[in-house]
Amino acid sequence: MTLDLRGILLFIVGAFLYSLLPSKWRGWLILIVSVIGVYVFQPFLPIRFSDFVLPTLTILLMLAGWWFTRPKDAAFTREDRLALAIIGGLIVGLSLMRFVDTSIRITPSRPPDPLLVIAALVIAAVIIVGGRRLLPINALILVIIGLFVAWKAEPLAAEISRVWRLGTEQDASIASAFDLNWLGFSYIAFRLIHTLRDRQSGILPALSLREYAAYVLFFPAFVAGPIDRAERFVKDFRALPDMRGLDATRFGDGLTRIGMGLFKKFVIADSLALGLSLNPVIADQITSAPMFALFLYGYALRLFFDFSGYSDIAIGIGILFGINLPENFNRPYLKTNLTAFWQSWHMTLSGWARAYVFSPISRAMIKRKWNPILNVLIAQLATMIVIGLWHGIALNFLVWGIWHGVGLFVHKQWSDRTRVWYRGLEGRRKQLWSAFAWLITFHYIVIGWLWFVLPLDQTVRILFGGGA
Amino acid sequence: MTWRKLIRIVIKAAIFFTICNLLWIPVSAFDLWGRVSIYNTVVPGRGRLPYGENPAESYNLSLTSIPAMLASHEINRPKAEDEFRVVVIGDSSTWGWLLEHDQTVAAQLEALGYMSEDGRRVEVYNLGYPGMSLVKDVIILYAATQQHQVHADAVIWLVTAQSFPESQQVELPIVQNNHWLASRATYEYESFWHGNIPDPPSPRMFDSRFVQSTSILDSTLVGRRREIADWIRLQVYGFAWVATDVDQAFSDEITLRQSDFEADTSWFNYDQSQSLTDLAFDPFEDAGRWSSRIPLLIVNEPIYISSGENSDVRYNSFYPRWAYDQYLELLSNEMQGRNYLDLWDAIPPDEFTDTPVHLTVEGTRMLAERIGAELESIGVVRR
């Protein structure tokens, strides 16, 4: 099950019941639903047990993240013990779905033997506890990045699939990278890296296991973000017991936001996706350049409405449950320069990249007294390449990252040199210039989507070989 | 915000939703919304009726609303002064299964460049639709000629034995979902509305499968949601259709029609010792009635004639020899006094694709030439 209409309705009804619960149960309920959600949202995978193992790995990584970010002198409180017992109990409990009829099973397929699951959890606990004693936080960051690379690079993912298939005595000749769709991992990885890096820099507040797990796995944001910050999330989470139960304002705001998201996602985006949006198949079938351009614009709009609609739904559900997730989009296609676009498109991802890629690289180069212009170029390229590769480790995403990195660099140089002149513009001249700037920015972004949506060889063939 | 305000919003929304549903009832009663279309206005009309088993790849889909289907067709554009409009109806072989829309029999007939006797250029429109049922063909022709006012100057109807058994007539979803249209089509329109049911009434009118129990709720927005969604999808696919010219998804490998058979002599509910008694010939009467002022040419489609195992028993996977031979005789008797062209063995076996009636591009060209020659000989068109 993904976050479809049925799931959204279930969350809305659930939010009403949640509001009627005793206030001190709220945080626990969010933890429980979030842990179960990791398994329920996971789509069925063709490799045996993989759709149970991958969600379990998500939870183990979360536990490792908490253990590594926990101050060494922090007490293992009663709340932590209870949270650990609930998480472990839910994992084992869900593995018991192995013995129930498919009609009532909530896992995507038949889970492995519960005894095996318990043994794996014990081994994982030993590795996590031992790992924390022996290894620095950077080691866990490397493990997360390693898993990310392995899952996002098609040849590596295909190889993992092949080996896994051999292990489960399935046909390895049909192994494919798409066999292992690890739902939510891209977002989980960035949340974990955020907490680990903030622990290293000493700015992460001390979090209980319940708080940490709810932050990393929070069910509305699990599938497609936004990527919240832990210190912001935990502020709302700790305020849950004081939240008014059936608060009309909260329900009004949440439902309005969900309604907007549903319209954007299921009406506009899905309609565009049907027959007015570029994809690799239709790109080779389109017979004229103007139509190709039309479908590229369609793709740009579809991407925005799809993603911002999903964000609206996640934010709306978050509001219903008392968690105000951060905004992810702010009219990005209306911005008049690329920097403003990236401050309003997938804002939580670009904010993450600014904090953990751009700033550290810039600081390091400033320390070494590099040429400031080169400094900006390298930092912006690195940031945008990371954002590109986050979508998938492939050449087209690399080029898309470079496209935007170069664009941001050029805009920075331009605005540094024209700021005074621009401030002097007034009235109609300023309006005309803004319109021109919007036109240039929008089309730079739209052309950039070409690198994003099509494999690189196809884009090159179409652009330079007269494919369309 | 207060709960009172929130509840007021919900109540207003519910009232608005109910009103919209009620307003939809008269709209859906005559499928008025189905006639609204971006085709022939924003994008060009389709070269054949929408039909698709894999919409994501064919940018095409199967609908239940015949008015919406016709509205998306190129025939829905105004007829030019110098145009002689020929409509072709039939099954999937007419629609052009495994053929591009410009390779169908209608398209190839048009490409022959005929003129009408009075000098107008001949434009041929493909109103074929997959499915074996003469009633299906009749209701499409009825909807086109009587409701959409396509102003046809001639009709060509390709048929094969598989479309004739009575049991085949009303099973297709397109017929079931347009029973109101089918009821009118099997009865003369005016007589139906004036309570003067023609004599003898067609038993199909009282077929429980036609007279489906429908409630008022079936005509509301909620009740018609599937049709409305399909209609929206058809409009959206219009852009992909015009951008790609694709309206059918072809699989990489096509399994060719069967050449060797079991020695099975059964055909529908018949065996070799029986006479074919329930073939539906009355749809020809209906079609003839509406097109009484224009020429109607009925063509018995070519079939694949196998020379494989047990081909002495069967012509192909559709037809045992005895049944098809009997059908040929019955049809030719029925066609006395009509414009009839029997092409059952006119196309070489190599020109058939996946079924005994689907033709290759070349086979379709041969068929178009034969039909063109026949139209010429009966004085409908000239070179």
Image (spheres, rainbow, N blue to C red):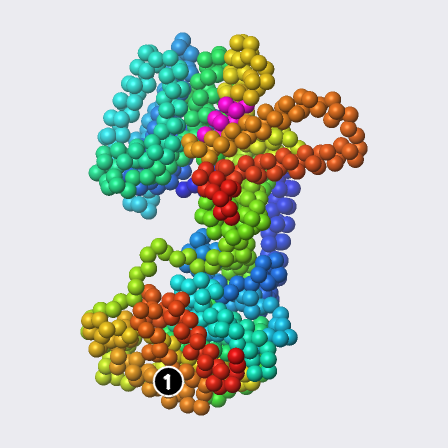
Determine the residue located farthest toward the right in the rendered image: A427
Instruction: Please give left or right for residue A84 compared with residue A442 in the image.
Output: left
Residue numbers of the magenta segment:
A380-389
> What residue is at 43 percent from the left and 66 percent from the top?
B96
Could one spot residue A103 in this view of the protein?
A: yes
Residue A89 vertical position relative to residue A43 in the rendered view, above or below: above
Chain assignment, label 1: B
For label 1, the residue is B331
Q: Nearer the viewer, residue B320 or A68?
A: B320
Q: Amino acid at mark 1?
A: Leu
Residue in the picture at 59% in, 25% down:
A409
**Magenta stretch contains residue A452:** no
Please say whether residue A98 is visible from this viewpoint: no
Instruction: Please determine whether, in this image, residue B281 is positioned above or below residue B76.
Output: below
Q: What predominant SS class does the magenta segment belong to? A: helix
Residue sitting at the far bottom: B337
Report x, y in % for residue B38: 59, 59
Could you say whether the residue bearing mark 1 is in a helix, strand or loop? helix
- Give residue B129's position: percent from left, percent from top: 45, 69
Please give the name of the residue rendered at 69% of the width and 36% of the height, measured from the top-left corner.
Answer: A436
